[in-house]
Image: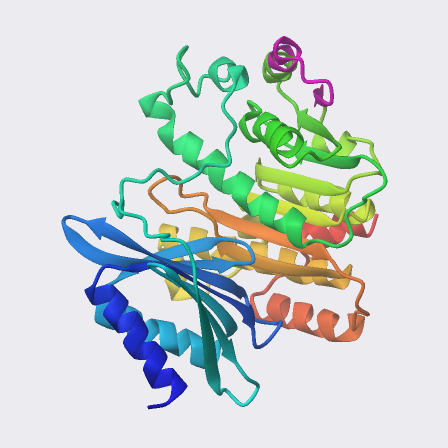
Amino acid sequence: MTSKEKLYKEIEDSFAEFTFVNLTLSSVFYKSNELVNVYIRPVKIKEENLLSFTYRYKTNDIVKNYSDNHALIEIFNLLDNNFRKGVLFIHSKEISIYVSKKRELKYSEKLIENKIDKNKSHDIVKKRKVVDGLYLHLLGVTDSKGNVIPKMSKKYKQIDKYLEIIDNLIESNKNLPKDRTINIVDMGSGKGYLTISLYVYLTEVKKLNVSVVGVELRSNLVDLCNNISDKCGFTNVKFEETYIEDYDNSKIDILIALHACDTATDDAIKKGIVSEASIIVCAPCCHKQLRKDTENTDNPILKHGIFNERYYEMLTDAIRGIVLEKYSYTTKIFEFISNEHTRKNILLVANKSTKKVNIENINTKLEKVKNSNNIKIHYLETILQK
């Protein structure tokens, strides 16, 4: 019996005997792989024993639950194609798994204290990024006892997901300053849900030295957020009343623009590019500019309003991504949260890169997209030329 067959039987027996504790797969074969690691643990859902797989990507997590047989197949598929290492805990044993460059699997084991977790219930509460505190009550997210108000539960989940994404971006970014304050600007900060929550998380949990500024045009919201900050004793988070394009700060390390309407997203992106921000995070909305400026009447699909809207949403954000590439940013566009929480669930993330950029190739790609869609120029291009 090969090492792989022995390990297969070991895991299979642990499922049958309920002695499987957890398995972590890590160390990818290829650095370009978006999947960073996988964490596997037993759960019980509706009285059925399953294995929960948390797939940890660079920007988000995906959870899937499998029956025993499917779980075994998936584990060995991941070891064959994705990961070099694994650490498996079975009752009183720790098993270290190694996969060589030639894809040969070996493992070793040692006895440890019994680590089995008798509570395999799916009711275990996920550890949240949002930090409890008075600020959540003042923002109207929780009641006086600290419980999330039912109608604010979706907003709470949104904030938590944003914090998770930004935390991952900060952890993986090598360009952020380590010898000075990290300057974070939230363009179009609104009521300050994320702005203040991010400040609290980064200072209290991550113990980072950060300065956070919320830029907002509505004076009542600026006053509200500054009052909350003062009441909570937050010394390094403030809100300013101004247009995004008028905000003057050349030292931005992380730029955030969540749901800045239409071309306000482009104004925010420009600020990030000009200041050479290490990280730019945008959740665009509205996307009106191309719809107004582009004649595409020959396309029969676009006579349907909903298709017209989605078509120009995709075009707008795709062009933004390409333009960011010209300025040495690596870009990703993805859904950050389920549609059940918000329709505005697309996130554009850009990381400043030190790699040399082939401007000619990027310009060719950009012109191809524009020409094939009868687009003369995108607003972001226009303001970057000024």
Q: Which residues are magenta?
A: 227-241
Instruction: Please tell me whether residue 158 is drawn above or below residue 319 in the rendered image.
Output: above
| Residue 122: % across, % down | 27, 45
Quarter location, residue 373: bottom right
Is residue 179 rendered to the left or right of residue 149?
A: right
Vertical arrangement, residue 139 with respect to residue 359, above or below: above
Q: Is residue 97 above or below residue 352?
A: below
The residue sitting at 27% across, 66% down in the picture is 14
Query: What quarter of the picture does the N terminus occupy?
Result: bottom left
Residue 376 in sight: no
* Residue 257 figure quarter: top right
Tell me the residue at 84%/47% (across/down): 386
Q: Is residue 96 visible from the viewing direction of this image?
A: yes
- Residue 94 magenta-highlighted: no
Name the spot of residue 178 as percent of width and height, x first: 81, 44
Residue situated in front as seen by the camera: 290 or 198 = 198
Q: How is the image coloured?
A: rainbow
Question: Looking at the rendering, which quadrant does residue 226 occupy?
Answer: top right
The image position of residue 289, as x and y in percent, is 59, 47
Residue at 69% from the left image edge and 55% from the top image edge: 351
Q: How many marks?
A: 0
Which residue in the rendered view is the most extreme toward the left? Answer: 47
Task: Give how far across and how far down residue 124 sits, in percent.
Answer: 32, 40
Q: Nearer the viewer, residue 101 or 31?
A: 101
